[in-house]
């Protein structure tokens, strides 16, 4: 039997290093020269005391700090988890896969993780290398080590964006997503997601936005069936109606399997789908209410046009800006359930419409989408500030989930929530004052009843307040999320199709041992 490969077999040496007193700019230059994504920070005895990565560079830039004066010690991750060269690669991958690292310092005599920083640096290993070794092991040897829900398991490479849960940071391509929401319109972000870069001139921006405007109109073949879709069922389920309408849309436009078309045609399908989704949402909602759909206007941007088609009048500028910031903040967010679904479907070579419809299906599950309205319902149930503490205390004691608090990935403040809290503050209103009080009270109650279990507000908590203030009905909160997320889904679909391989994982069988004889039917 072949000997298990170890970290020492895979690690790189010598390691690109930096001193804590050096400037970040100097360390970044060394990273560029050696084409590496991180430097290990060492002391005068060559002991690993920290690591500085590309994500730290992004964090520094987002904070507006000057890399030429900022010190490595101020931005590095101190006392990072390290690993010993003798650890088996598969065991190392299983232990480290949930931590979000990309590069791990290898130190002399270290174990798998923890309490090894400060030992002498002997190399560095990437999670990608560990993953590749782990993935060539037989499925039955790995199955017991794969966490339920694939949490922390790397399943693909992507350049669309990333979520850094431990740091409270996420980005689209190379740009801080929150900074994009504050400084660019959604059409620019859409350009970034599809083209890999932001538009650099007004003419380039207008050309891209013009291509969007031309695709907003619902084709007659689809418009004719929308009334039947909208009134179907005793209860209006907007995402279900949107799924049906998009299936009809893809068929009407003749979407073909991604496996059988070129990249340009697939991109054209993606542009059309992203542009028409807001129009479909508003048309279906208005038809259900017995109102005529409102055609899009070419003189309005994405967010303003969305509110106009919904409400029938040009929105206040501050409302359009607020909704646009929310939409930008939700374009993409790592390999969440709906994004992964879109990529799995695309990996089969299916058409883009099928992938987007599948993603909407995943989003419709209450564990993934729909929380903004439920967070607002919690505010309604509490009602007044004096009821907040007893209501929250009773909920925590019962073990109920607090809507709008906590996140699967973030272990600190959700950056989307922080931005939307500022947006909600600027809009004002009674709900915002109550929300602030509930947030502070929840933190106090949790500190008392669940010490050590700190929960932070997530994007849904203040998103609901922003959308409610801007006149978006609660039943359209999640479809509004879907409208912007379609841009992110399509960016992932284009990326998956460009370098495709069928996603076909294995499962661990846990039933009765086979083979068993087939029993006869008793008479």
Image: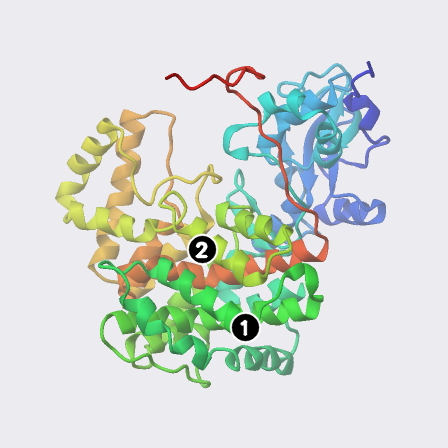
At a point 28% along the width and 64% down the height, the residue shown is 232
State which quarter of the image contains the N terminus.
top right
Name which residue lies at 42% across and 84% down: 297
Q: Please provide percent x and percent y for residue 287.
A: 28, 73
Mark 1 surroundings within 10 Å by alpha-carbon count, few (fewer than 14), some (14 through 19), many (20 or more): many
Between disc 1 and disc 2, whose residue precedes? 1
Choose between 15 and 86: the one closer to the eye.
Answer: 86
**Residue shown at 57% from the left, 51% from the top:** 345
Q: Check whether the beta carbons of the residues at disc 1 and disc 2 lie within 8 A of each other.
A: no
Asked if residue 79 shows in the view, the reply is: no
Residue 162, image x, y percentages? 59, 48
Of residues 414 and 44, the one drawn nearer to the viewer in this rendering: 414
Residue that appears at 74% across and 43% down:
37
The C terminus - image quarter? top left
Instruction: Evaluate whether residue 259 shows in this view.
Output: yes
Residue bearing the label numbered 2 = 360
The image position of residue 107, as x and y in percent, is 75, 21
Give the vertical position of 148 relative to 244 (above or below). Answer: above
In this rendering, is residue 339 above or below 110?
A: below
User: Distance from label 1 to label 2 (Cα)?
Assistant: 17 Å
Q: Secondary structure at mark 1?
A: helix
Q: Residue at label 1?
A: 272
In this picture, residue 238 sits left or right of residue 396: right
């Amino acid at each position: 039997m072949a000997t298990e490969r170890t970290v020492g077999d895979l690690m790189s040496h010598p390691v690109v290093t930096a001193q804590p007193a050096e400037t970040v700019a100097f360390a970044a230059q060394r990273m560029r020269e050696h084409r590496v994504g991180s430097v290990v920070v060492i002391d005068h005895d060559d002991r690993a005391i920290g690591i500085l990565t590309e994500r730290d560079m992004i964090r520094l830039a987002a904070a507006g700090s000057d890399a030429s004066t900022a010190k490595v010690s101020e931005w590095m991750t101190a006392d990072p988890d390290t690993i010993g060269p003798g650890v088996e690669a598969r065991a190392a991958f299983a232990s480290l896969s949930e931590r979000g690292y990309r590069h791990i310092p290898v130190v002399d005599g270290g174990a798998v993780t923890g309490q090894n920083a400060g030992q002498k640096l002997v190399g560095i290993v990437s999670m990608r290398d560990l993953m590749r070794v782990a993935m060539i092991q037989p499925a039955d040897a790995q199955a017991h080590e794969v966490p339920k829900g694939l949490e922390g398991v790397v399943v693909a490479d992507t350049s669309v964006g990333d979520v850094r849960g431990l740091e409270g940071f996420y980005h689209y391509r190379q740009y801080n997503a929150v900074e994009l929401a504050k400084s660019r319109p959604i059409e620019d972000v859409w350009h970034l997601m599809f083209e890999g870069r932001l538009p650099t001139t007004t003419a380039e921006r207008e050309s891209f936005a013009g291509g969007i405007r031309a695709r907003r109109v619902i084709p007659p073949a689809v418009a004719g069936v929308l009334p039947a879709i909208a009134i179907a069922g005793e209860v209006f389920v907007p995402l279900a109606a949107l799924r049906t309408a998009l299936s009809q849309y893809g068929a009407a436009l003749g979407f073909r399997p991604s496996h059988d078309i070129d990249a340009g045609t697939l991109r054209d399908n993606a542009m059309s789908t992203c542009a028409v989704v807001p129009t479909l949402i508003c048309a279906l909602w208005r038809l259900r209410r017995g109102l005529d759909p409102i055609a899009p206007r070419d003189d309005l941007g994405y967010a303003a046009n969305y509110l106009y088609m919904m409400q029938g009048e040009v929105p206040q500028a501050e409302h359009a800006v607020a909704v646009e910031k929310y939409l930008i903040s939700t374009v993409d967010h790592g390999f969440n359930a709906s994004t992964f679904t879109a990529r799995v479907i695309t990996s089969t070579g299916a058409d883009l419409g099928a992938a987007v419809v599948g993603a909407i299906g995943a989003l419709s599950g209450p564990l993934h989408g729909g929380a903004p309205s439920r967070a607002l319902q919690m505010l309604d149930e509490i009602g007044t500030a004096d009821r907040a503490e007893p209501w929250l205390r009773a909920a925590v004691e019962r073990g109920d989930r607090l809507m709008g608090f906590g996140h699967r990935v973030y272990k600190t403040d959700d950056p989307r929530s922080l931005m939307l809290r500022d947006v909600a503050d600027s809009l004002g209103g009674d709900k915002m004052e109550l929300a602030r009080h509930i947030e502070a009270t929840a933190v106090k109650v949790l500190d008392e009843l669940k010490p050590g279990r700190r929960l932070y507000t997530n994007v849904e908590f203040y998103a609901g307040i922003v959308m409610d203030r801007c006149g978006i009905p609660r039943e359209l909160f999640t479809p509004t999320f879907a409208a912007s997320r379609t841009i992110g889904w399509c960016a992932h679909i284009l990326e998956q199709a460009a370098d495709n391989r069928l996603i076909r994982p294995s499962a661990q069988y846990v039933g009765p041992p086979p083979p068993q004889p087939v029993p006869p039917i008793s008479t």
